[in-house]
Amino acid sequence: MSTLVIKDLHVKVGEKEILKGIDLTMNTGEVHAIMGPNGNGKSTLLSSIMGHPKYEVTQGSITLDGEDVLAMSVDERARKGIFLGMQYPAEIPGVTNSDFLKSVMNTRREKPLSLFQFIKTLDKNIQALEMDENLAHRYLNEGFSGGEKKRNEILQMKLLEPKFALLDEIDSGLDVDALRVVSEAINSMRNDSFGVVMVSHYERMFELVPPTHVHVLVGGQIVMNGGYELVEKIDQEGYDWVKELGVEAFKAEKKKPILLESCARKVTEHE
Amino acid sequence: MSKYQIDCQYYIVFQNGEIVESSIDDGIVINDQKIIFSNSNPIQIHMIYLLDENQSMTVEYIVNERVQVDLIETRQLRDNAQFNRIIELKEDSVFNMFNENCSDNDENIDFNDHYTLSSNARCICGYAELSDGSLSSSVHYDLIGEGADVKMRMAALSKNQEKKAFEVTIQHLSPHTFGQMDNYGVTQDQGVLTIDGIGTITKGQYGSETHQNNKIIVFDEKCVAQANPYLYIDEYDVKASHAAAVGKVDEEHLFYLQSRGLNKKQAMRLITYGYLKPVSEIIDNELVQKRFEETLSKVGDERA
């Protein structure tokens, strides 16, 4: 069994503090759901565990089986068994999916995979995920539909067999069939040496992959821990009840479109 | 036998201007440093050029009417060497070339190609400029016959304080001519790389098209990279486009690849590999592709 421990984690982006003291302990064999309103730090938490350079950890610690994760580079974290299934995976032109996947599978092997072994493993997983066989020959994520990108993330998770998979809204952009395929893939990996941390807004995802632990993240803090009953409560009531706990949620910033009139408008003295 | 030799039935090895080894078809005539191709069937031939310090050499290729040649070319030049090629592609000829620069030099070397394409001659060229050492290079195409068509692609790597400068010119001198250049570069470890792309369509060359794409990835701050596109057009009925970009590897791309366990060097190499690889796909030869990939593995290496 492996354990991922997060203690008093503070993270800022630029000058803004997004996470304000997160404490979480996750063991393999468990499925943790992290829920919360948009813009309150869920993705930041997952990206910070993976080591995204945009996020600066200002305080606290993350350890994996006692080892300091924050001292590791992004790739070391991956090789130690942390996997981030991204909400918006990067599109990388020129790099074919198969070249990429082969390199990825070789990162944790002393002897490189033979072409035959690689193709066999890839084909098996592509079939299981009901993916388009041509995806292997296309450029990495380029021109993939939302659903294809998410399946490609799950494909990598299956090939890498991490200890902890951090799945950031892996259900967004998936139709009903794709959701079934993806959740089956996650469930097929569930065992004592595999743990999942899932961020999702939808009860449907958690019905298909039932969490063992549920955490509500609001205003950069975990405001409540519980079990599946929390998923149901949020599905029915939203997050208004959080105010009763005395926590102020961050408001997701609305992006305003720039209109020609906003720069061309004549400013008068009355304004 | 040269270490660069590949499994190719026909080959010529030049050392300082002299032929030291060769195996050629009846359709190939060598007259001093002029090589005339009149083969009735398409052939693949490997040319190796070895030039020592301060040596210079000019070679001329003539590809006769309706002849097809697939050329793999390896050149190794030492300090201050100069190598010039004059390539004449006659009517309806087809010339596919992959050219690899395997030089290892401390002082600058000079490399110049001048092509002339007659009516309906077709030319596809790939230049793998991944050598160790500084270089000045000029590649010039004169499209003198109607319907002449050239597509060239270059992959250039400048590293370890090397200075590499390339000038690629496509000059449209007849109507309905087509030119496309794609110049891709990578600079690392204080490398200097300049790519000038020049497309010229003179008056009266209606129905012509000239396109160019110049892109350079900069690995670290101390590199110098310039991608300069120039289009000189004096005719209305033409199509032309250019693009030039110099930039760092996208941080999100790096993060994505690293989050899958690839270290920074492996990630950079994969990105560069994808970026430069199409050059080697012009010629279908496994050994050449393998050598190109081996050379590409220099990318991201710590300074020697």
Image (cartoon, coloured by chain):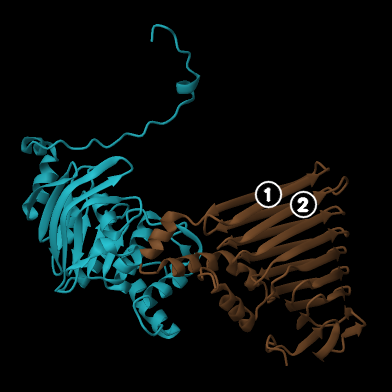
In the rendered image, the quadrant that contains the C terminus of chain A is: top left
Q: Amino acid at mark 1?
A: His
Residue at left 88%, top 59%? B144
Q: Amino acid at mark 2?
A: Gly
Q: Which chain is brown?
A: B
The answer to whether mark 1 and mark 2 are in CB contact below 8 A is yes
Q: Which chain is cyan?
A: A
Circle 2 chain: B
**View extreme (top): residue:** A270
Residue at left 20%, top 42%? A37
Q: Which residue is mark 2?
A: B199
Q: Which residue is mark 1?
A: B242
Q: Position of residue B282 (x, y in %)?
A: 67, 72
Q: Position of residue A200 (x, y in %)?
A: 22, 52
Q: Position of residue A55 (x, y in %)?
A: 31, 50
Residue at left 61%, top 82%? B286
Label disc, if present, on residue A56 of the rendered structure:
none
Circle 1 chain: B
Quick one: SS at disc 1? strand
| Front-lying residue, B97 or B207 | B97
